[in-house]
């Protein structure tokens, strides 16, 4: 039985279009970033050496991972909205935990970027020494590291209990709790499984949301895609000016 996703008389945030786009696009982008660096050892010294030897590939990998992580927030809020109609407590705690965790991953991505710049300027050994000596340093975001791990489990249970997702897709969603946190974490078989589970859980829900209550026309799809591309290009241009 398909979950009741939308109502023509109901307004909710982030809305049908942004929610569906995030559900469909964010998980594959997230998985792409993970797969692009699968050939390299996941520990940070090897990640820095890989960046020094394959800068474009590693930049693309970490950029896709970060972009997918950022784009996940509308998907998580949308899933929480659907779960919350039948199981509000699971939706509140699961959604909030995952959202806090997404902030933590974004913070780590900033540290990754800085480490790569140090490797580019001073070499991988210097960057590895800096990361090694600063590992475990206190920062506020440390308090958020565990939230995303528990959050995906809470969302998976809530998705199952609310009948938003079936048992297989609910378990697939919960697998994201196994994805490692921290600076310069590369790819392992666990991270591939976790991100694949995210795709299995969320992408079909995005297409279901697009079809509810009526599917969009081809014209609206093309106009929305063009507007999205122009917006991203404009934001990137003005961001570079800053």
Image: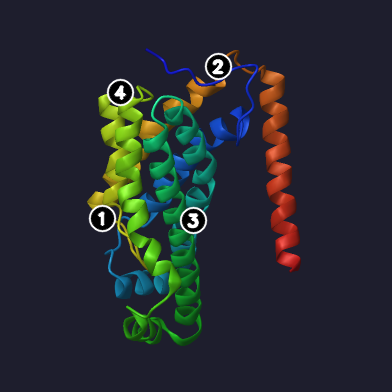
Q: Is residue 3 above or below residue 133?
A: above
Sequence-first disc among 3 and 4 = 3
Q: Residues within 10 Å of mark 1 (few under 14, many from 20)?
A: many
Q: Is residue 156 above or below residue 103?
A: above
Q: Residues within 10 Å of mark 3 (few under 14, many from 20)?
A: many
Residue 20, position in %: x, y? Answer: 55, 30
Sequence-first disc among 1 and 3 = 3
Residue located 31% across and 26% down the image: 161
Q: Secondary structure at mark 2?
A: loop
- Image quadrant containing the C terminus: bottom right
Question: How far apart are the alpha carbons under marks 2 and 4?
Answer: 18 Å
Q: Secondary structure at mark 1?
A: loop
Circle 2 residue:
212
Circle 4 residue:
166
Q: Secondary structure at mark 4?
A: loop
- Mark 3 near mark 2, Cβ–Cβ under 8 Å? no
Horizontal arrangement in the rendering, residue 29 relative to residue 232 (left or right): left
- Mark 2 near mark 4, Cβ–Cβ under 8 Å? no
Question: How far apart are the alpha carbons under marks 3 and 4?
Answer: 28 Å
Residue located 45% across and 76% down the image: 115
- Mark 3 near mark 4, Cβ–Cβ under 8 Å? no
Residue 134, position in %: x, y? Answer: 36, 83
- Mark 2 near mark 1, Cβ–Cβ under 8 Å? no
Horizontal arrangement in the rendering, residue 160 relative to residue 206 (left or right): left
Q: Is residue 14 above or below residue 64?
A: above
Question: How far apart are the alpha carbons under marks 3 and 2?
Answer: 30 Å
Mark 2 or 1: the one toward you: 2
Residue 66's disc number: 3
Question: How far apart are the alpha carbons under marks 1 and 3?
Answer: 17 Å
Circle 1 residue:
188
Sequence-first disc among 2 and 4 = 4
């Amino acid at each position: 039985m398909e979950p009741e996703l939308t109502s023509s008389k109901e307004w909710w945030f982030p809305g049908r279009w942004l929610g569906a786009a995030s559900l469909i696009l964010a998980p594959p982008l997230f998985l792409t970033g993970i797969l692009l660096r699968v050939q390299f050892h996941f520990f940070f010294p090897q990640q820095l050496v890989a960046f020094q030897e394959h800068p474009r590939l590693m930049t693309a990998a970490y950029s896709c991972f970060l972009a997918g992580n950022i784009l996940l927030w509308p998907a998580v809020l949308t899933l929480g909205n659907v779960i919350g109609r039948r199981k509000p407590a699971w939706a509140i705690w699961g959604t909030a935990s995952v959202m806090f965790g997404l902030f933590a991953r974004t913070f780590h991505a900033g540290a990754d970027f800085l480490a790569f710049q140090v490797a580019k300027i001073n070499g991988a050994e210097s960057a590895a020494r800096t990361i090694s000596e600063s590992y475990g340093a206190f920062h506020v975001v440390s308090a958020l590291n565990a939230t995303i791990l528990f959050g995906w489990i809470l969302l998976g249970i809530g998705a199952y209990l609310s009948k938003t997702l079936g048992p297989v897709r609910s378990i697939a969603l919960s697998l994201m709790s196994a994805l490692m946190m921290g600076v310069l974490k590369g790819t392992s078989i666990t991270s591939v499984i976790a991100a694949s589970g995210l795709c299995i859980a969320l992408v079909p829900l995005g297409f279901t949301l697009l079809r509810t209550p009526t599917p969009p026309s081809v014209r609206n799809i093309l106009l929305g895609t063009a507007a999205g591309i122009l917006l991203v290009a404009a934001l990137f241009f003005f961001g570079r000016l800053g």
